[in-house]
Amino acid sequence: MRALPTRKLDKRITRVWRLSAIINVVFWSLICLLPVFIALMVIGADSSQGDSTDILVLTILNVVFAILAVVALIVFVVIVPKIRWIQWSFEVYDQEIDIHKGIFWKKRIIIPLIRVQNVDTRQGPIMRANGLASFTVATAAGEHEIPGLQVQEADELRDRVAILARIAQEDV
């Protein structure tokens, strides 16, 4: 069996993943907490609408959602980005691109350069703020992304793979 690829993503990608996780956890926590909190305020303000059991149930529900939000923050902001970075590796060879990723479901993707149709680099606002870009390879089977590269490295990789793919297709 072939050895795993050795090139790693830039360490700053963990900041990007953490910030994305914070945004997602806060958004979904508000989606869950707000309706329960509003119902609690409405029932609590008008005591004729509900009894103390309704208020107790809503309070417990609110506390449970808040605890779940804190646990999600710890898991997805502190733990997962570090493990994700450790598991990510890639290598670009003369004939193929080798990608290894995944925490629970590990993926090993080998992309023959002869199958490459398009290569590009992308930057969202969070990645741009951290000086990072992602490199994307498109084939007939779909797109494969290598996130978290320095902008210059992503551009060089894009240009190199474009040349190697052209050479591979000319050889056929």
Image (cartoon, helix red, strand yellow):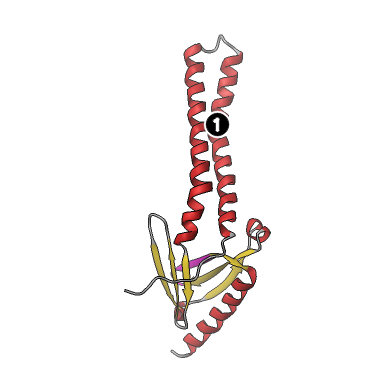
Q: Residue at x 48, y 51 (%)?
A: 80
Left or right, 1 with respect to 171, comes to: left
**In the image, farthest residue toward the left:** 1
- Number of labelled discs? 1
Queried whether the magenta region covers residue 151, the answer comes back as no
The correct choice, above or below, for 37 with respect to 127 in the image is: above
At label 1, counting other C-alpha atoms closer than 10 Å, the crowd grade (few under 14, some 14-19, many 20 or more) is: some
Q: Residue at x 35, y 75 (%)?
A: 2
Mark 1 secondary-structure assignment: helix
Queried whether the magenta region covers residue 143, the answer comes back as yes
The correct choice, above or below, for 5 with respect to 129 in the image is: below
Q: In x, y percent, where is residue 51?
A: 50, 11
Q: In x, y percent, where is residue 3?
A: 37, 73
**Amino acid type, residue under disc 1 in the picture:** Leu
Placement of the C terminus among the 4 image quadrants: bottom left
Front residue of this view, candidates 131 and 41: 131
Q: Residue at x 57, y 35 (%)?
A: 30
Placement of the N terminus among the 4 image quadrants: bottom left
- Residue under label 1, please give it: 33
Q: Which residues are magenta?
A: 140-146
Q: Residue at x 64, y 69 (%)?
A: 151
